[in-house]
Image (cartoon, coloured by chain):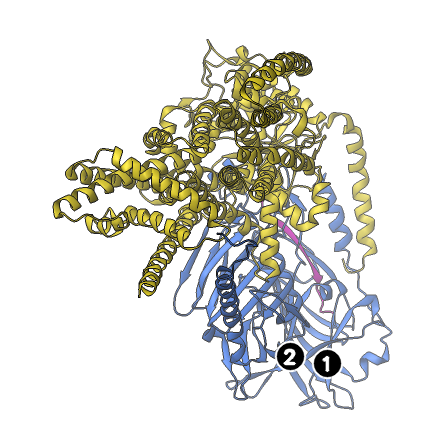
Amino acid sequence: MEVSEDQKKAASKSLQSAFGSAICFLTLLLIGVLAFSIRLFSVIKYESVIHEFDPYFNYRVTQFLIKNGIYDFWNWFDDRTWYPLGRVIGGTVYPGLTLTAGSLWWFLNSLNIPLSVETVCVFTAPIFSANASWATYLMTKEVKGTGAGLAAATFLAMVPSYISRSVAGSYDNEAVAIFALIFTFYLYIKTLNTGSLFYATLNALSYFYMVCSWGGYTFIINLIPMHVLLCIATGRYSSRLYVAYAPLVILGTLLAALVPVVGFNAVLTSEHFASFLVFIIIHVAALVSYVKGILTPQKFKVAMTLVVTIGMAVCVTAVAVLVAAVAASPTKGWSGRSLSLLDPTYASKYIPIIASVSEHQPPTWPSYFMDINVLAFLVPAGIIACFLPLSDASSFMILYIVTSAYFSGVMVRLMLVLAPAACIMSGIAISEIFHVLTRSIKFEKNKSSGNPSSAGDITTVGNSITQSNKRKSEKQSEDHNLKEISYQRPSKKSKRKEKENSETVLRRFKKEKRLLVLPLEVSIISVVLIVLLGGFYVRHCVWAAAEAYSAPSIVLTSRSQDGMHVFDDFREAYSWLSHNTDNEDKIASWWDYGYQTTAMANRTVIVDNNTWNNTHIATVGTAMSSPEKEAWTIFQSLDVKYVLVVFGGLIGYPSDDINKFLWMVRIGGGVFPHIKEADYLRDGQYRIDSQATPTMLNSLMYKLSYYRFIETDGKGIDRVRGTEIGKKYFKLTHFEEVFTTHHWMVRIYKLKSPKNRIRGKLKKAKSTNPTGNGRKTRVNPWH
Amino acid sequence: MALFLLLDRLSVLVVVIIFAILFVSPSFSSTDIRILKAERRIDLTSSIVRAFHTLQVENIGDSHASEILLAFPPDQAKHMADLQASTSQGKKKKKNYIHLDVNPIDSSQTPNGAKLFSVSLNHNPLKTGETKTLELLVILTHVLEPFPAEISQSESQLVHYRDSAILLSPYPVKEQMTYIKTPSKKVESYSMVNPTNRVGEELRYGSYADSAPYSYTPIIVHFENNHPFAVIEELVRVIEISHWGNIQVKEQYRLLHGGARHKGVFSRLDYQSRQSSSGVSSFKTLLAKLPPRVHSVYYRDDIGNISSSHLRLDSKKSELQIEPRYPLLGGWKTSFVIGYSLPLESSLFEMSDGRHCLKFNFGSPFLETVVDKLTIKVVLPEGSKEPTASVSFPVEQHHETSFSYLDIVGRPTVVLKKENVVPENNTPFQVYYSFSPFFMFVEPLMLVSVFLLFFITVIAYLHTDLSIRKAA
């Protein structure tokens, strides 16, 4: 009788738990769908097209990979860019994204699903955002349980900061790298929690994928050692920590060295030193804890002093050698970008080319609100929740949020690294807040009805409270139900979890006793307010996805009374170049348009967005800042046939070349001192009106931008700068206009050929021509 | 300099050279035929040259003539897109035209390589002493040669048209007349072969009497023609049939402005503000006539959607007006893709023997454009059998297999190829095939079974405990 009762109970419980996990699975699926579909605004509002600048390069590389195969890809020397230097693509790109999209395409095509490379590239980012939100769920679950996991995944699915880099069409490294980052962290925490070598190996592989995908992998290889160091310093050393860290360093470094772009940098540059240092330290700590275990306390003390004195001496010499070696290199073994992270003023002082990129600027406060919105307010609560109680995993989270907050403060681009941390923290915060509030409500309700209930009743009570509350309380119940699953199934997977969970449950019971119970009204109001906050977040995210971040930037739209107007000038120009110039012609433009020109127009460019050679960019900058004749000489020496400038003055497109011109001057002047920034500024002000300096008005950029501009409206009002232009009537002597797009946004000029020297030859050719023609006509009887 | 050159050239050409070939090889005049009256009307108003010949033929020999030969200079024969012949029958009011077959024949022995075509009259041969009126339509492409070959943006386009004042024919022609219609009154020069008149937009050569076989008097007309010389260098049309109710058409174009090449500066300012005098020979838009009831129309190229197009739909026809990314000046090229879908029942018919028949237009949907190379691929559903195509004019055809969504054996594809296609070729062609509806369900069933298998695997995995040591 009793046995059957037990069985019944067990059966109902397992049913409940199955129901819970099914809901959890369904929620995750919906989160994935949400993450995918919120990024489709760009496709719906605009079209399925690759966005901006870098994605075009990635797209081109992917096309090459698919066309020529992986071996040619590794050996690819691209002669269409950085003319006449060229670029070794195989050895200088992070191949993760390309290989991912390439294998996706290959898989689909092997099933005979004929998707174009472009389509696959466009949708890679949304797919990986869904993956990233699932990875966030897993990671947060490891830190604070299922409820927090689902909340964090929901937050990440629509955090604007991540959306900005992963809308459909934004085919960039970051799209897959954020997934890889979160997943690597998840596996690290998983290993830390389980001590399983299996997860440690997976962790190394995931790290390898991250190294393949993005230069931001250095964040991982510095953050994890920091955390390990923190654990050791706070006396949290354990064998699990060792398993989590040591294999990662060894395997991870070996694997990272396999990626051509990283290669020996994985052991040579300063970015990686921290991991090796901590690797030594963890072994010392392991040794110490081992010795501690076999010696008596007195003997241990003696041994300790002995080792410490000898060890200190060895360490000091080692550090001295290391410092000497590092100091020998000019940048102290750090790359420019890393240095500008450590010293935010570094770039603006020494490398204008890094400083000139808008995404390398420090962010403003509004951009925090724009990019992570209400999460910024929830993060502190999440940090507090992580301290209650502090575990290895939660200490990692705290470290992660603190470091990423610092980095995001240096470069607006690294807001992207902050976003997942902020989501996880907010997920934890929201989950904890709901936990406290629903418990209070339940407690109050039970008190009023005088009916003591078990913890398992949270579900029913939660459901009965308010409609808006329902979702969260379900999560709570899932959290609970999952725990029950682990009770029910003592398999290899749940064995450890069971232990862990029973601990947490115990802890929670203690906490429940300790925490004060809030009054019913306060709890309900707080719940409503929190839900409102969530609603505000969702609204903001949808707005950001739809309005702020979905523009592909190669096609612009404006709305007026008579409907929408499309400015498709960039593609018009690239299409013209691709169809109506010779395949071998070289195009000079500012480096921003290099990737697009090679990808869309398939023409050789002088410089592109890769910016690996400062001198070359400075040469183009100098040419643009020089008077026509000098510029012509420079371009002629580079074998340039066409010069492309972007001009927004007619329609008011603000990010045109005139607005970027000072950077050309600065970068050019950095290498060629005869270009002085002061010559282009009138009393420290950058202007193009009649007050502008003669150097400015005679520069090639000015002339190419405003050539015959006066004839459009008779006054020459530049709609971006809002002023009348300085020099109105002038002729070009060394360049001729060959194409201007519909809205004048792109103007293409051809270098006139140096004709003076061959004038004699021309005459001769002309005089021989007619006789040749005449003979031909006579021979042909039909004419 | 250029003027001098022109005059020099013309003076050479204007010299009347008559190729009066006296020995006429017997093989071409086995029957004695002469042309009583020949009238030619040559229309030069567009980039495609259409010549209407009306020949009154008389048999003066002893035997019946079952075929009549036509001769064309090799240049014209090379650029000939279409040659249609018909003869009228019956009384004046109840005239009905009978289409006659025209075939090129071996012309290795003709003087100066003139190309011969034979019009067969096999149903009612021309008896001795009888006369008959033949109507010919000759369509020539790429014969208007821009001169000067390169113009700047402000110039208008002048072209040369070369022909003979006298009809080239293997037979003697008793009386003939030629009318040449130019698009405007702006005719720079024309060869004089007396009598020659110019009335408005028309040039009249003739009448000339009693010309010998294979007489040829070269003339050259130099006139203004700003008609868009839109040439589709290559058009690949893929028609994919799905028996779930849809026909998908995708057309890939490579477009060229085949007129005088643009040289030097292109100023957008002049182009936009002085449209009447700047870039007059260029074109900005093209009009395509699509089948009625089209939907899901798209217009894009390699780098994305082209946002400048208009679609007008009504029950009888669909008109798509497209604008390439940039205006096409002489010699400029572009490429794009147009795609659309049609309901299945609008073009697919079931025959009485259970076979299916697809009926579709052959040529390009654009008005007054030449297609240099046209390839049509009709992709039939997977599992269809015995595809055959029937086209009313000779085309090259072969079969291949293409793969699309989840195909295993591939879809039979009929490929039709033709060069030099003009709007006159825009007639329907048919593709017949047999198809069993069972094949429609193969792919859904496949998907269902794959998912089923997946779920079973998951269930099986969840119910097996693979751990080596059972937990205590």
| Residue A561 in picture, x, y percent from top left | 31, 42
Q: Nearer the viewer, residue B454 or B317?
A: B454
Which residue is identified by label 2?
A: B134
Q: Element at badge 1?
A: strand
Q: Earlier in the sequence, mark 1 or mark 2?
A: 1
State which chain disc 1 sits on: B
1 and 2 marks on the same chain: yes
Which residue occupies the extreme top position in the image? A683
Residue tagged 1? B68
Which contiguous range is marked in magenta? B152-168
Q: Colour of chain B?
A: blue
Whether the magenta-drawn stretch holds residue A430 is answered as: no
Where residue B262 appears, x then y in whole percent?
62, 43
| B164 within the magenta span | yes
What colour do you see for chain A? yellow
Q: Mark 2 — on which chain does it sit?
A: B
The disc labelled 1 sits on which kind of residue? Ile
- Closest to the observer: A674 or A384? A384
Instruction: Inspect this view and state whether residue B371 appears.
Output: yes
For residue A707, say whether it is visible: no
- 10 Å crowding of disc 2: few (<14), some (14-19), many (20+): many
Query: Horizontally, is B90 left or right of B394 in the view?
Result: left
Looking at the rendering, which quadrant does residue A139 occupy?
Answer: top left
Q: Secondary structure at mark 2?
A: strand
B18 left or right, relative to A711: right
- Which quarter of the figure has residue A429? top left
Q: Position of residue A99 (x, y in %)?
A: 62, 46
- Quick check: marks 1 and 2 in contact, CB under 8 Å? yes
* CA separation in Å, label 1 and label 2: 10 Å
Callout 2, which amino acid? Leu
